[in-house]
Image (cartoon, rainbow, N blue to C red):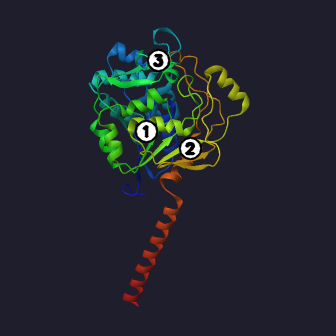
């Protein structure tokens, strides 16, 4: 398949969500993949390195690199390896590698390019901005939550409500990210933490304008589970509505939603640990609300993801999307089978016409 025939696909988000989607789509040769990653992470290992070394947060970048890497498994494991003891406890090797190379090269983009060569990246990883910024959320009662470390565990956001949400200092979109969005055939947002991975991308100056201007099919992947105190009891419609309140109504073309409940033992275990519930598309598997089509399916991974003991600086999710199920669904959504069949018929028709022309000339 020629490069021109491929679809330019952008995946936006952070954490395990963007890792899952990139892993899901990497196996399809018809896609040229690009990840646009938020740069406001100040929690966990990324937050410590950002504060102590003055570098841009490497964690989400590392996860994208591992997802897109075609290096041997041992190299991908090395990038994700977390130290269990001593002063480096909780830090991953990949985070340290990226941060060290950024200090040496003077540029996060340069460090991404160099490490990309080493671990054989299939695709491109683009920071949404090239400067450091910190999230600041002001609630309706005047409380200010400064930084991801304060917003992620906050259990009063839903009850009190948000008055203002911004990045300080103001960040401007990376020109590479803007160009990639304008050239895209499909843009996938999510899954991921609503207030620390997804919406922060659109708080960067210039991102909303580029997103709206892009002719790409805009796809939202709805989280499989709610977050206590932030999205309790939400439906896929409410989650999509909250995101569109920052980017504009009717901008999302398709919302991909899970409609299968996790098995009860795992659900009870997750509720006990996180006090979360499934965000399900109930009823018909295809529903249209406004300009957005909500499509449901069973996208749950059958595995149980446990947090590494060394991952002491941040809490991770237990229930996740299945890369295999999600990848198969997204590939059909981005490249509909009907369109492919129509293209095949056109190729056959052209081939037949050329054959007849050849016979007429040389008969």
Disc number placed over residue 244 in the picture, else none: 1
Most extreme residue toward the front is 141
Left-right relation of 302 to 7: right
Front-most of residues 292 and 13: 292
Q: Earlier in the sequence, mark 1 or mark 2?
A: 1
What residue did someone put label 3 on?
A: 91
Quadrant including the C terminus: bottom left
* Total labels drawn: 3
Disc number placed over residue 192 in the picture, else none: none
Q: Helix, strand, or loop for circle 3?
A: loop
Quadrant including the N terminus: bottom left
Whether residue 40 is visible, yes or no, is: no
Asked if the residue at tag 3 contacts the one at tag 2, i.e. Cβ–Cβ closer than 8 Å, the answer is no
Residue 263: x and y in percent read 71, 33
Calculate the distance from the C-alpha at mark 1 to the C-alpha at mark 3. Answer: 35 Å
What residue did someone put label 2 on?
A: 326
Q: Judge whether 288 appears above or below 265 on screen.
A: below
Mark 1 vs mark 2: give the one in front: 1
Front-most of residues 319 and 29: 319
Q: Helix, strand, or loop for circle 2?
A: helix
Whether residue 136 is visible, yes or no, is: yes
Asked if the residue at tag 2 contacts the one at tag 1, i.e. Cβ–Cβ closer than 8 Å, the answer is no
Q: Earlier in the sequence, mark 1 or mark 3?
A: 3
- Mark 2 surroundings: few (<14), some (14-19) or many (≥20) residues within 10 A: many
Q: Earlier in the sequence, mark 2 or mark 3?
A: 3
- Mark 3 surroundings: few (<14), some (14-19) or many (≥20) residues within 10 A: many
Calculate the distance from the C-alpha at mark 2 to the C-alpha at mark 3. Answer: 29 Å
Residue at 58% from the left image edge and 17% from the top image edge: 309
């Amino acid at each position: 398949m020629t490069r021109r025939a491929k679809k330019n696909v952008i995946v936006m988000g952070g954490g395990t969500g963007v890792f899952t989607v990139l892993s899901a789509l990497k196996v399809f040769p018809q896609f040229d993949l690009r990840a646009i990653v938020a740069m406001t992470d100040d929690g966990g290992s990324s937050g410590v390195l950002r504060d102590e070394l003055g570098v841009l947060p490497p964690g989400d970048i590392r996860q994208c690199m591992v997802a897109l890497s075609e290096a041997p498994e041992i190299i991908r494991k090395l990038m994700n390896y977390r130290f269990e003891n001593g002063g480096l406890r909780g830090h991953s090797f990949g985070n340290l590698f990226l941060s060290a190379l950024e200090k040496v090269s003077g540029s996060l983009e340069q460090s991404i390019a160099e490490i990309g060569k080493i671990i054989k990246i299939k695709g491109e990883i683009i920071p949404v901005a090239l400067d450091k910024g910190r999230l600041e959320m002001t609630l309706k009662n005047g409380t200010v939550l400064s930084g991801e470390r304060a917003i992620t565990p906050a259990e009063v956001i839903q009850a009190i409500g948000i008055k203002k949400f911004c990045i300080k200092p103001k960040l401007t979109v990376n020109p590479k990210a803007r160009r990639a969005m304008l050239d895209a055939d499909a843009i996938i947002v999510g899954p991921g933490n609503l207030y620390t991975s997804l919406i922060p991308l659109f708080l960067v100056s210039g991102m909303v304008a580029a997103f709206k201007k892009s002719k790409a099919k805009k796809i939202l992947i709805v989280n499989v589970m709610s977050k206590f105190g932030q999205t309790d009891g939400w439906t896929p419609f409410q989650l999509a509505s909250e995101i569109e309140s920052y980017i504009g109504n009717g901008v999302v073309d398709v919302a991909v939603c899970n409609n299968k409940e996790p098995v009860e033992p795992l659900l009870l275990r997750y509720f006990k640990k996180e006090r979360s519930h499934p965000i399900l598309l109930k009823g018909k598997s295809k529903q249209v609300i406004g300009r957005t089509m909500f499509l449901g399916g069973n996208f749950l991974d059958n595995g149980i993801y446990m947090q590494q003991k060394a991952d002491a600086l941040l809490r991770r999710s237990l229930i996740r999307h299945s890369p295999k199920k999600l990848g198969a669904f997204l590939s059909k959504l981005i490249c509909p089978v009907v369109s492919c069949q129509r293209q095949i018929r056109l190729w056959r028709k052209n081939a037949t016409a050329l054959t007849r022309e050849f016979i007429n000339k040389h008969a």
